[in-house]
Amino acid sequence: MRINFIEIQNFRKLKSVHVELDDETTLFVGANNSGKTSAMLALGHFLVDQKRRDGTGRRYVN
């Protein structure tokens, strides 16, 4: 299985983000406090534990 892109909505600082993933390497580059770590954490939640929930009881990943 290959992940072509990720879409993140309402996760921490990120309201709506679409990230295309390269076949070999994808880099997150941006200014401090721009959401790079939030994007990586969202991807980690998806890959590791899809049942993890936020404080409201909703799932991070649908």
Image: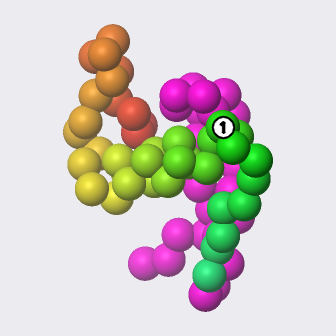
Q: Position of residue 21 (x, y in %)?
A: 65, 70
Tell whether position 21 is magenta: yes
Residue at image coords 23%, 39%: 51
Q: Position of residue 7 (x, y in %)?
A: 61, 47
Q: Quadrant of the N terminus?
A: bottom left
Farthest right residue in view:
31
Quarter containing the C terminus = top left
Farthest bottom residue in view: 24
Residue 47 lies in magenta, yes or no? no
Q: Position of residue 25 (x, y in %)?
A: 62, 81
Quadrant in which residue 29 is drawn: bottom right
Instruction: Using the image as rendered, state which of residue 42 and residue 6 is in the foreground.
Output: 42
Examine the image and state in which quarter residue 15 appears.
top right
Residue at 53% of width from left, 48% of height from top? 37
Residue 17 seen by the camera: no
Outermost top residue? 56
The total of numbered circles placed on residues is 1
> Does 54 sit left or right of 2 as displayed?
left
Q: Residue at x 67, y 78 (%)?
A: 22
Region rendered in magenta: 1-24
Residue 31 place in picture, x, y as percent: 76, 47
Residue labelled with disc 1: 33
Residue at figure coordinates x 46%, y 45% from the top left: 42
Q: Helix, strand, or loop for circle 1? A: loop
Q: In the image, what residue type sits under mark 1? A: Asn
